[in-house]
Image (cartoon, rainbow, N blue to C red):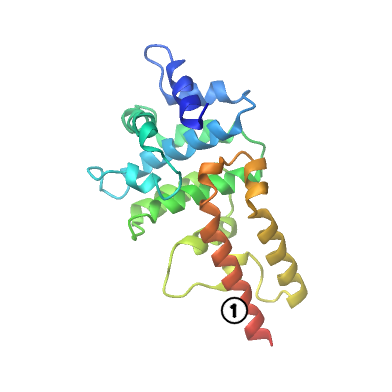
Amino acid sequence: MSIWSRISDALSALTAGEGLSAVFEKLRASPDRTVAFTIAVIALGAKMAKADGQVTRDEVTAFREVFHIPASEEANAARLFNLARTDVAGFDDYARRILAMYEPQDRTLCDLMEGLFHIAMADGEYHPGEDEFLHRVAEIWGFDDQRFSRIRAQFVPDAERDPYDVLGVSPEADIDEVRAVWRAQVRETHPDRLMARGVPEEAVKIAEKRLIAINRAWEQINEART
């Protein structure tokens, strides 16, 4: 059974009048973390779609940048997206219920945030409304400013991207410490690590930009120090 079929089953279990908030509650005890991850990214992504003022565009196209959606499963993906977009519950309610599915400081929350950044950048622009949205979600999930800035630096092509921000290390750190942080982040980006945390195989593409960014940051720092 595909992940999209399992998602369809989860949505079908909703009773009349229940929204996605009820799905998050039911998934808290579920061992299938891949379903929880996928629903969380698409649900928050649908809420974020309103943040850039482009609610009329085909947002499913953006999700293709994160998930491989077979043509046969597009209806299930679109159903989930539309359910989230029309749900009366706010994105902050979603964010709190998603937080309840994971342990504090769970690395999967960073994976989720990276998925949202990937969606935000799918159209090549980073709207101020998207930045405000993502910053608020990060606050609810307990991210400090440094943690949020590090993830943002991996995805948003600002004119000046500080390599120390990308790796999340101090400019005063010695080169051995920087190297250790870089290697640890490369290990955490391995597809096997991602899938062990519940990131579905269909979504491991979200790690590509992270890997490119952290490798480039290490190269810049190492070159500047030698």
**Residue named by callout 1:** 220
In the image, residue 45 sits, relative to residue 169, either above or below, namely above
**Identity, as a three-letter code, of the amino acid under mark 1:** Gln
Q: Give the tally of numbered discs.
A: 1
Left or right relative to 127: residue 210: right
Identify the residue at the far left of this view.
Answer: 56
Q: Nearer the viewer, residue 108 or 75?
A: 75
Q: Position of residue 175 (x, y in %)?
A: 73, 77
Identify the residue at the far bottom of this view.
Answer: 226
Q: Work out which quarter of the rendered image holds the C terminus and state it.
A: bottom right
In percent of the image, x 45 and y 36: which residue is there? 92
Q: Determine which quarter of the picture holds residue 63.
A: top left
Note whether residue 77 is visible: no
Q: Determine which quarter of the picture holds residue 215.
A: bottom right
In percent of the image, x 41 and y 47: which residue is there? 133
Dot 1, how many residues are within 10 Å of its Cα: few (below 14), some (14-19), or many (20+)? some
Left or right relative to 181: residue 219: left
Say what secondary structure mark 1 lies in.
helix
Note whether residue 31 is visible: yes
Q: Determine which quarter of the picture holds residue 74.
A: top left
Q: Position of residue 81 (x, y in %)?
A: 36, 34
